[in-house]
Image: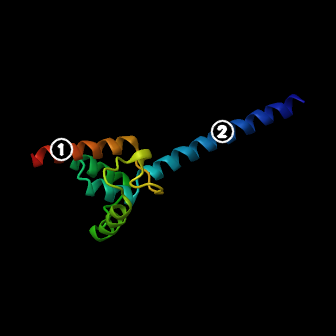
């Protein structure tokens, strides 16, 4: 009986470890996306932040692709949308992290001050 219990505990621990590893890799995959890069670039976030994002993504998306992504976002994004829930527009499957949304807010604020 003890052998079965020990086996059960090992299986549960293994499943937990595999699940945690999957969650971490899924989180990383979601954080760095082509769409996210294009949105951050369009919003003119800090160039150093954008370079780090590009390095983590593994490549720099082409301008033509970013133009398409940003046209789509602009078409569906309501006026004064503040990336609620990390989404570039309501119902979007694209999600940005709270840090990325903060970078966008800073960039918008800097842009506003530059126009004055």
Residue drawn at the location 86% of the way across and 28% of the way down: 2
| Element carrying mark 1 | helix
**Could you tell me which quadrant the C terminus lies in?**
top left
**Could you tell me which quadrant the N terminus lies in?**
top right
Residue drawn at the location 43% of the way across and 49% of the way down: 31
User: Label 1 to label 2, Cα distance in Å?
Assistant: 44 Å
Answer above or below: position of 50 versus 11.
Answer: below
Answer above or below: position of 87 versus 59.
Answer: above
Label number found at residue 95: none
- Left/right of residue 12 with respect to residue 46 in the rendered view: right
Q: In which quarter of the view is residue 110 placed?
A: top left
Residue 9, position as x, y percentages in the image = 76, 33
| Element carrying mark 2 | helix
Label number found at residue 16: 2
Camera-side residue of 86 and 51: 86
Answer above or below: position of 71 versus 24.
Answer: below
Residue on which disc 1 sits: 110
Residue 35, position as x, y percentages in the image = 38, 59
- Neighbour class for label 1 at 10 Å: few (<14), some, many (≥20)? few
Residue 37, position as x, y percentages in the image = 33, 56
Give the mark toward the camera: 1 or 2: 1
Camera-side residue of 35 and 59: 35
Residue 108, position as x, y percentages in the image = 23, 47
- Left/right of residue 94 with respect to residue 82 in the rendered view: right
């Amino acid at each position: 009986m003890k052998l079965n219990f020990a086996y059960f505990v090992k299986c549960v621990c293994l499943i937990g470890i595999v699940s945690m590893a999957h969650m971490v890799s899924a989180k990383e995959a979601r954080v760095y996306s082509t769409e996210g890069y294009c949105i951050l670039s369009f919003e003119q976030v800090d160039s150093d932040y954008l370079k780090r994002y590009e390095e983590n993504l593994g490549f720099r998306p082409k301008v033509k692709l970013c133009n398409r992504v940003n046209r789509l976002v602009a078409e569906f994004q309501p006026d004064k949308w503040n990336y609620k829930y990390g989404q570039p527009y309501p119902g979007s499957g694209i999600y940005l992290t709270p840090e990325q949304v903060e970078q966008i807010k800073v960039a918008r604020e800097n842009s506003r001050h530059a126009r004055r």
